[in-house]
Amino acid sequence: MTALSSALREVFGERLLLDEPLAPFTTFKLGGPADVFVTADRPDELQRAIVLARQASVPVTVIGGGSNLLVADEGIRGVVIRIRGGEVREVEPGRIRADAGVTINGLVRWTIAHGLASLEAWAGTPGTVGGAIFGNAHFQGRNIGDLVDSVRLLNADGAFADVPAADMEFAYDHSRLHRTGEIVVSADFRVARGEPEQLRAVARESLAYRKRTQPLSMPSAGCIFQNPMPGRDTMPEGVPWSAGALVDRAGLKGAREGQARVSPTHGNFIVNEGRASAGEVRTLIDRCKRDVYRRFGVRLREEIVSMGFEPRQTPGPAGTAVSGSES
């Protein structure tokens, strides 16, 4: 690790930190330290870090905006790379390209300002483009993958590839990245011309809906569980096909473990009331799963990405894992 840290410092300079707490880089505001933490602003930096870590046989974890992410109190071993920033540009009429580190809100603002429609309803979505692609972020029954034309990916060997949307294996809360461990570099989205004022109106309504229905004033990671799916799950009569409804009807709204609490506003959110630990959140997640199954016979599946928990961490090639999406 010493030799790897020295090599990485040549690339990242002061953007390399040792034993850096990850809590400030997650929307949950909790999580232990990374052995080595670097912030990558450009694809070539990301590529170099991946290659160096692979040569040293050190695991790599990649994060984006830190939403939809639960980091263990013990932190994450190896190298954690945070992808930050980038730009949005129109590559041809009807198609724009956004770098992985661009926030979804930044992408929405850019498209509205340029009079381009298709992404305005995603206003208020936390996290980055890379995280949204990783988890095929969804909102009000729509998946962001439905708007994607192609994605540029980086694999564990440091090779780039342009992958059409049809080959991304997009499904509910899923993309091929869960299987391959590839990392998003940028994504191309299909757009159409629109009137900026009309697009802003849609964005304002999306923001208003989130404020009405989600506990936005407290740290959280977005939705904790996937919604039940017809054909996969069997729901009790009269219960909506909603993980939040199941948690609510199991009497768990407001339930707490230490300073982690199931939100009284939305049963599919767990909030950090101040100094919650990741262990407390983990215990509360397991309690919700257990009680919902005992009451309704439905197995809640986690939407949140857990890192640093064994064996729950989701590794890819060379230990690569990607996070930062939103539900």
Image: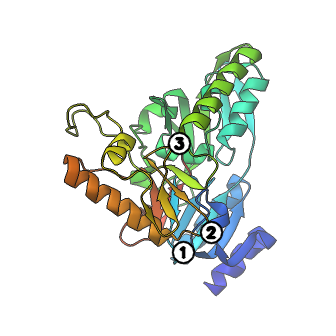
Whether label 2 touches label 1, CB < 8 Å: yes
Secondary structure of the residue carrying tag 1 is loop
Q: Earlier in the sequence, mark 2 or mark 1?
A: 2
Against 18, is 124 above or below? above
Q: Give the residue furthest to the bottom.
A: 2
Percent across and percent down for residue 304 are: 45, 54
Q: Earlier in the sequence, mark 3 or mark 1?
A: 1
Q: Residue at 71% of width from left, 54% of height from top?
A: 84
Q: Earlier in the sequence, mark 2 or mark 3?
A: 2
The answer to whether residue 299 is left or right of residue 326 is left
Tell me the distance, in whole angstroms, between the alpha carbons under discs 3 and 1: 24 Å
Three-letter code, disc 2: Leu
Secondary structure of the residue carrying tag 3 is helix
Q: Which residue is mark 3?
A: 133
Three-letter code, disc 3: Ile
> Quarter of the image holding residue 197?
top right
Three-letter code, disc 1: Gly
Q: Which residue is mark 1?
A: 75
Q: Which residue is mark 2?
A: 22
Q: Residues within 10 Å of mark 2 (few under 14, many from 20)?
A: many
